[in-house]
Amino acid sequence: MIRTLPSSKAYTAAFNGFIILYFTFLFAPLIVTMVLAFNDSMFPALPWKGFTLDWFFGEGPEKIGIFHDKSNLRSIGVSFRVAFAVSTLATIIGTLAAFLFEQENFRFKNFFYFLMIAPIVIPGVILGISILLFANTVGLFFENQMGIDIGILRPGFWLVVLGQFSFITTIVTLVIIARLRKFDRTLEEAAYNLGANRFEVIWHITLKYLRPSIVGGFAVAFLMSFENFNTTIFLVSSEATLPINLYLQVRDGSTPVINSISFLLILATSIVAVINLYVGRRKNKRAP
């Protein structure tokens, strides 16, 4: 749509109708989910039975709120620990990989670049099954041939971390590469001319320039890990992450406590997004 050109009433109406339908499709399910967190009903669905805060603060025996629900609180804790471990590892390795792929003398760079992006093309279900079978095969080999029990290869926390790390690292690498390609290499040359060594140039010049993309990559990795389901479900043990725990509750029948969890997560991510937008605008205003 070219704003400077005149448009008919039908076109304007269709355009406005598309905008309304588009955003209604995006946000209506979220709004309904958030509203039902306050529904005084035993089922996470309509009809509306009245307003209540029991699904947040209820202590039972009929209504147990999220702040007293040990199972869901435990799964939230597991998800946070997994997401922090995955995002930390993915950010470190992703930053190093970004430097690697920007080396001009890196042989077979295109081939290894293709291998790097392969995990994000492979469906998560296939990736999860493959990692589980590989871990079981290697673990049985060491146990049968050498009598060594490698706990990290059994379904559990660290196998979930390794499984998510295998594809989330690629996302972080691509985020950092995108900014690194815009970096002015003459800044490094100027630092060398002023007497800085290689470590000082990387630490004070290059990494400082990459800081927004590194922080952004960490945030993306954390969110992707926290909400991952397809890969995690094959690698998790008895300590389920939040998405898997919610899936089991929805499958077997649950209360609106799942709506209260969704409400808190939507609220938290919205606050973080608003803060990030506010900080970004302040930095842009300060920039010369």
Image: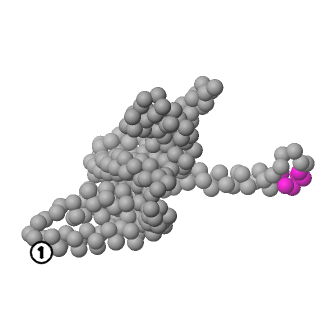
Q: Could you say whether the residue bearing mark 1 is in a helix, strand or loop?
A: helix
Residue 25, image quadrant? bottom right
Q: Quarter of the image containing the C terminus?
A: top right
Residue 158: x percent and y percent? 26, 56
Question: Which secondary structure type mostly characterizes the magenta part of the structure?
Answer: helix
The residue sitting at 46% across, 65% down in the picture is 108
Residue 190: x percent and y percent? 51, 32
Task: Say whether residue 179 is magenta.
Answer: no
Image position of 58 with respect to 244: above or below: above
Could you say which is closer to the camera, residue 122 or residue 198?
198
Image position of 21 with respect to 179: above or below: below
User: How crowded is the residue under tag 1: few (<14 C-alpha within 10 Å), some, or many (20+)?
Assistant: few
Could you say which is closer to the camera, residue 78 or residue 23?
78
Range covered by the magenta-colored residues: 7-13
The residue sitting at 36% across, 57% down in the picture is 165
The residue sitting at 33% across, 42% down in the picture is 67
Residue 160: x percent and y percent? 31, 59
Could you say which is closer to the camera, residue 72 or residue 171?
171
* Count of numbered labels shown in the rendering: 1
Q: Is residue 10 visible?
A: yes
Say what amino acid the circle numbered 1 marks.
Answer: Asn
Residue under numbered circle 1: 144
The residue sitting at 85% across, 55% down in the picture is 11
Q: Is residue 172 visible?
A: no
Image position of 213 with respect to 24: above or below: above
